[in-house]
Image: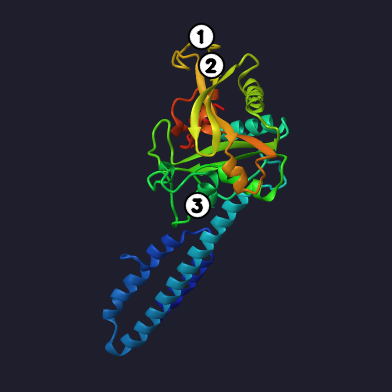
Amino acid sequence: MKEKLEQMRAEALAALSDRGLDPETLRIRYLGKKGELTALLRSMGELPPEERPAAGQAVNALRVMIEEGIEKAKKERAAASLEKKLSAEKIDVTLPAPAASGALHPLTAVQRELEDIFCGMGFEVAEGPEVEYDYYNFVALNIPEDHPARDTQDTFYITDKILLRSQTSPVQVRTMEKKKPPIRMISPGRVYRSDAVDATHSPLFHQLEGLVVDRGVTMGDLKGTLEIFAKQLFGEDTRIRFRPHHFPFTEPSAEVDASCFACGGKGCRVCKGEGWIEILGAGMVHPFVLSNCGIDTDVYSGFAFGLGVERIAMLRYKIDDMRLLYENDVRFLSQF
């Protein structure tokens, strides 16, 4: 028995040192149901009783040695395999990166185009917080507490006095508080209203509002500014018209339409046969708003306007569902 164990030990050590042999094959050879060491264990019943304890200890020691050797061989084999794989898959970081393809989101492209048009007319871009005080979003803009726009169904309130801005007009108020006339600015950005999501509404959308305050500003200045804007956006043949409307922060107020860029005003599917497309709201800044910002209404007057970036993008790219602008579908975005 002792000679068999010594011979098996020597053979096992030689086999374990051979990195070409599969560790699982060695396990089956020595420790499997029909393995050599298993067969040796079964033959121990043939030994005299006094020799069995010593033989059992020797067999168990050999089994432990073989198990530990097999486990070590498995780890070494796995490490060698990983090293080979990493060596084959390594990346040469000195190589130039592949050219990235992509384009601006249609909303971003339209907003930048609008900014370029107004900046070309001398406007400055101003920004403000999206989490706003009730005072700047409503009170300073001549919107009383009982006005429908202040209903909690339309506005996302955080507290009684803090909310997610429902328009970018608060930026105009903040600008008038900090800067003396003349003022010529636009305020693009995200706004929030509690609207149900459908093809033309979203609880989050983008606005761009403009403000001019100076001596002798009239409705004619507003019309001239918006005519230049419409011609640069939709083409030199574009005409605009004003329709009477009401906004709390402007007086007089108007909805502004542009002649249909698709049919030139003759009537088509895009303009629903009317020949005109509503593009924005505008008006002369209400004296209350000016005086509330510390501006002398006997000296200065101003006009303001606001438009929806999504609406312009949908008109420009003939998009019939606003939700497409927010879903990040690559099939849709790759068209721009």
Q: Residue drawn 42% across and 61% down?
A: 24
Q: Position of residue 140 (x, y in %)?
A: 55, 48
Q: Is residue 133 visible?
A: no
* Quadrant housing the C terminus: top right
Indicate the amino acid at tag 3: Asp
| Residue 222 drawn at (x, y percent) | 63, 28
Q: Callout 3: 10 Å neighbours few (<14), some, many (20+)?
A: many
Q: From mark 1 to mark 3, how far is it between C-alphas?
A: 44 Å
Which is more N-terminal, label 1 or label 2?
2
Residue labelled with disc 3: 134
Q: Residue furthest front?
A: 298
Q: Marks 1 and 3: CB-CB under 8 Å?
A: no
Element on which disc 3 rests: helix
> How far apart, in angstroms, are the residues tagged by discs 2 and 3?
38 Å
Reading the chain from its start, which is encountered first: label 2 or label 3? Answer: 3
The residue at the far bottom in this view is 50
The circle drawn on residue 260 is: 2
Q: Residue at x 45, y 75 (%)?
A: 65
Q: Nearer the viewer, residue 9 or 278?
A: 278
Contact? badges 2 and 1 (CB < 8 Å): yes
Q: Label 1, on which residue?
A: 266
What is the secondary structure assignment of the residue under circle 2? Answer: loop
Q: Up-down: is 229 above or below 72?
A: above
Q: Few, some or many C-alpha atoms within 10 Å of disc 1 (few <14, some 14-19, many ≥20)?
A: few
Residue 242 x, y percent position in the rendering: 55, 22
Local crowd size for mark 2, using a 10 Å CA cut-off: few (<14), some (14–19), many (≥20): many
Q: 141 left or right of 47?
A: right
Name the image colouring. Answer: rainbow
